Image (cartoon, grey):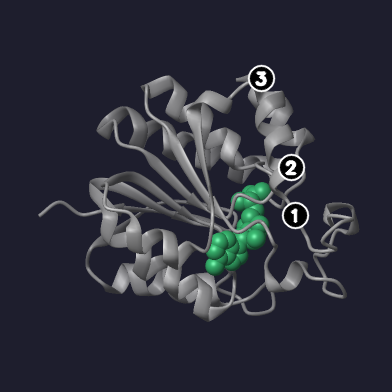
Amino acid sequence: MTDVVAAFEAAKGFMPLDEGLALHAAAKEAAAGLGLPLLEVGTYCGRSTILLADAARGAGTVVVTVDHHRGSEEQQPGWEYHDASLVDPVTRRTDTLPHFRRTLYAAGLEEHVIAVVGRSPQVARVWRQPLGLVFIDGGHTDEHATADYEGWSPLIAEGGLLVIHDVFPDPAAGGQAPYRVYRRALASGHFTEAGVTGSLRVLRRERG
Ligand code: SAH
Ligand code: MG
């Protein structure tokens, strides 16, 4: 685990270690209990992916991670989370895919990850397999966060986990779209809260 934590800390990304450890614990539990694949929306440079991959490896399953690798709205030039070192000099567009592949290679976890390059709602439409865990950390507009929830949450197996990042009940602390999705999941009656760490929320899909 120390090598995985070192790779996590070396990778570009937005997740603090305490939230990463909570994600890892949730993923371990879901992977061991259900033996089903884990799915991530929002790969970026793989910082969170390797935690899911380590959990998948331990349980003999895989993590599927989905991203168009062009960056979210707030990561475009001129915006708060833009990183010029992620721009492909040929296309002049953000391209996090090569950075993600380096992170995965450095962590020695390539065989435990299936990377899907595409738009989350389009991928969800062709995906039919039940999932042990869905981690939503993609686009943070209402449009994207809602589409991620509607596209992927019905595929979570009973007893499986829905994990949402960047949930800020206080509008002064951050954008509200992930928080609204979290409220909606609880209000649906299909999910109950199973853990809170920083802005990470773990919800469990009810049985029955
Ligand atoms: N989970 C990562 C951070 C993800 S940042 C970590 O912890 O390090 C959000 C990512 O979501 C960006 O890479 C962006 O390209 C991706 N994204 C945003 N909207 C998307 C969509 N509709 N479909 C696929 N990927 C999307
Ligand atoms: Mg996030």
Q: Can you see residue 166?
A: no
Q: Hey, what amino acid is under mark 2?
A: Pro
Any mark on residue 36, and which? none
Query: Dot 3, crowdedness within 10 Å: few (<14), some or many (≥20)?
Result: few
The local secondary structure at tag 2 comes to helix
Q: Residue at x 84, y 55 (%)?
A: 88
Q: Is residue 112 above or below residue 72?
A: above
Q: Which residue is mark 1?
A: 95
The x, y position of residue 11, in whole percent, is 75, 38
Label 2 – label 1 distance at C-alpha: 7 Å
Q: Nearer the viewer, mark 1 or mark 3?
A: 1
Q: Which residue is mark 2?
A: 98
Label 3 – label 2 distance at C-alpha: 24 Å
Q: Hey, what amino acid is under mark 1?
A: Asp
The x, y position of residue 116, in whole percent, is 51, 48
Q: Earlier in the sequence, mark 1 or mark 3?
A: 3
Any mark on residue 2, and which? 3
The x, y position of residue 176, in whole percent, is 57, 77
Q: Is residue 176 above or below residue 11?
A: below
The x, y position of residue 123, in whole percent, is 42, 59
